[in-house]
Image (cartoon, rainbow, N blue to C red):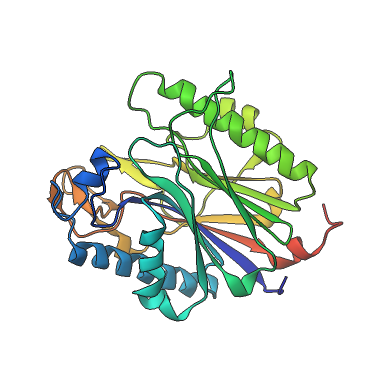
Amino acid sequence: MKLFLIIVIVFWNVENFFDTRYEGVSESEKEFSSTGARHWTQKRFTSKADGIAKTLFLISGNTGRLPDIVAFEEVENKAVLKSLISRTLLRKLDYVPVHYESHDHRGIDCALLYRRSSFGEVRTRSIPIRDEEGGIVPTRDILLFEADGLAVLVNHHPSKLGGGAQDRREAALRTLKRACDSLAAAGARVVVAGGDYNEERSSASDALLSPMAECSAGGGIPGTIRFQGKWETIDRVQTNRPTEVGVEIFGHDFLLEEDRTHGGLKPRRCYIGPRYNGGLSDHLPLVVTISSETLSSPGRQ
C-alpha cells in the first residue's frame, strides 16, 4: 500500500439518507420521498449531500488529509452514494462506493466510500446478524472492508425501541466478535470496528468483544448524540491495536445548533419531528486515525 503519515477513517450515522424516489420497499422509503410525509425533495437531498461533503473537507482540515474511508450508517442504497461522490465537492476525488442490501425492515444499511489511491486490492462483504440458533436477525448487516492488512467493520446495531431489542443488540455484538476473531486469525494486522451501537459502553460489551479494546474518544465534545439534554456516546470504536489508533468526536460548529429546551449545543438534525430543520444528522462523526507504519509493519505487535 502507499505509505502516508496516517490513515483516516470516519464513522458517521447520517440519519435517514434516502433518495427521493418511492419504490415500494418500506414505509420509511415512502416517508422520505418527494411525495411522502417529509416532502424529501431533490433540493433537500442535494443540501444534505453537499453538507456531508463539506464536513469531510472540514475533517481534512484537522487531519491533514481527506478520509481514506468514510463509513456511513442509515444509507438507503448505492444510488445515494453515487450522487454524493458525483454531484458534490467530492466529484473530483477517487472515492469508490460500497453498499449491500441488508435485512433491515426500514431499508437503511451500512455503507462506505474508500479512496482508490489509498489502497491496493480491496475486498468487501456484508455479514448478517445471527441469533444463537443461527437465524438471521432482521436488522442492519455489518459491512466489512479489507485491504493491505486493515479490516474495517461498519456497525449499526438494533435500537432500544421494540421488544427484544437487547437480545438483538447482543446478537449483533456476538456476530461482530466472531468476525473480529476470524479476521485476526486470518492475519489482519489492524482490525477496527465502529459505528452506531445504540448503547453506550458497558462492562458486558467489553467482556463480549474482548480482546478487541474500546477506544476512548477525545475531541472536546462529551458525546456523539444528545437526548433530552444529556450527551451520550453510542457511536463507538474498538480495535486490536488500541495504542496505535486514535479516535475523536468531530464537533465542528457547522454540525451543531443551540439546544433551546435544555441549553448548550446539540447536533443539528435534518428534521425535528415532522419539521425540516436543514441540518445533517442527530449524530456527530467519529474520526479514526491510524499510523500507516502500523499497517506496513507485519511483525509489529
Q: Which residue is pictured at 65% across the width and 41% down the height?
A: 213
In percent of width and height, residue 225 lies at 36, 45
Instruction: Specify whether 65 is left or right of 31.
Output: right
In depth, the one of 55 and 88 nearer the eye is: 88
Q: Which residue is pictured at 34% across the width and 74% down the height?
A: 87
Instruction: Specify whether 87 is left or right of 63.
Output: left
In percent of width and height, residue 62 lies at 49, 70
In depth, the one of 34 and 46 nearer the eye is: 34
Instruction: Tell me if I can see residue 223 in this picture.
Output: no
In depth, the one of 37 and 222 nearer the eye is: 37
Where residue 131 sits, quadrant-wise, is top right
Q: Which residue is pictured at 73% across the width and 70% down the height?
A: 1
In percent of width and height, residue 202 lies at 53, 29
Instruction: Tell me if I can see residue 29 in this picture.
Output: yes
Figure check: 208 above or below 282: above
Q: Which residue is pictured at 26% across the width and 48% down the height?
A: 23
Residue extending furthest toward the right: 299
Residue extending furthest toward the bottom: 92
Residue extending furthest toward the front: 23
Figure check: 32 above or below 167: below
Instruction: Specify whether 43 is left or right of 222.
Output: left
Where residue 88 sits, quadrant-wise, is bottom left
Report the label total. 0
In percent of width and height, residue 276 lies at 15, 54
Figure check: 219 above or below 91: above
Instruction: Specify whether 161 is left or right of 184.
Output: left
